[in-house]
Amino acid sequence: MNIDITAEIMFKTARSGGSGGQNVNKVETMVEGRWLVAASSLVSDDQKQIILQKLANKINADGNFLVKSQTARTQLQNKANVVEKMNDLINESLIKKRSRIASKPNKAAKEKRLENKKKNAFTKAMRGKINYKN
C-alpha cells in the first residue's frame, strides 16, 4: 500500500547552510515540509495512530509531521527530497512487522548441549579437593 501525501504537505522555506557559496546568503533553498496527521483525509484513524506512535520523534507538539532538507543547492530539489522522505517514512511505518516463529532445537543440538554439560561438570569436579583416604 503506497500512500502519497504530496497534496496535504505544507512547505516552508528558509536560508540553509552548507554548499552554495554566495547563493546560500541570498536564496532560501532549505525546505521544511509539514503534514498535520490528525487532519489528514488520506489515512484511516488506525493508520493515524500507527503513524503517531512510530514517527513520534518527528512529530511536534502541534501534531505536525516535520521533515526538512537542505542538502541540494536548489529549492526544487530540496522540495522533492522532502516529499520523497515523507512518503517513504509514512509508508515504512505502515508496514506490519512479521512475527517471529519460534523454532525448537533438533535432536543433535540437544545431545551436543548435554555432552558439553557433562564435560563441564567433569572439569569442575576435577577442581575439587583430592580425598586420599579412599
Image: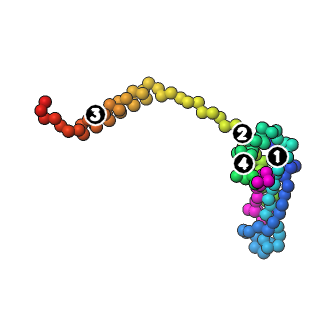
What number is the disc on residue 55?
4
N-term mark: 2 or 3? 2
x, y (%) of residue 120?
Answer: 32, 35
N-term mark: 4 or 2? 4
Q: Label 2 belongs to which residue?
A: 95
Specify the amino acid type for callout 2: Ile
Q: Is residue 12 above or below residue 134?
A: below
Measure the alpha-carbon separation of dots 1 and 2. 19 Å
Judge from the rendering whether residue 115 lies leftward or rightward of residue 96; answer left or right: left
Measure the alpha-carbon separation of dots 3 and 4. 54 Å
Q: Nearer the viewer, residue 35 or 29?
A: 35
N-term mark: 4 or 1? 1
Judge from the rendering whether residue 75 lies leftward or rightward of residue 107; answer left or right: right
Point out the stretch of residues depicted in magenta: 61-76
| Foreground tag (4 vs 2) | 4
x, y (%) of residue 34?
Answer: 81, 54
Measure the alpha-carbon separation of dots 4 and 2. 13 Å
Whether residue 74 is visible to the viewer of this picture, yes or no, is no
Q: Residue furthest front?
A: 61
Measure the alpha-carbon separation of dots 4 and 1. 13 Å
Whether residue 50 is visible to the viewer of this picture, yes or no, is yes
Q: Is residue 96 above or below residue 64?
A: above
Specify the amino acid type for callout 1: Ala
* Residue at x-position 48% and y-position 28%: 105
- Quadrant, the N terminus: top right
Count neighbours of disc 4 (C-alpha within 10 A) and say few if under 14, some if 14 to 19, many if 20 or more. Answer: some
Q: Label 1 belongs to which residue?
A: 38
Specify the amino acid type for callout 4: Leu
Judge from the rendering whether residue 57 lies leftward or rightward of residue 9; answer left or right: left
Q: Nearer the viewer, residue 52 or 34?
A: 52
What number is the disc on residue 122?
3
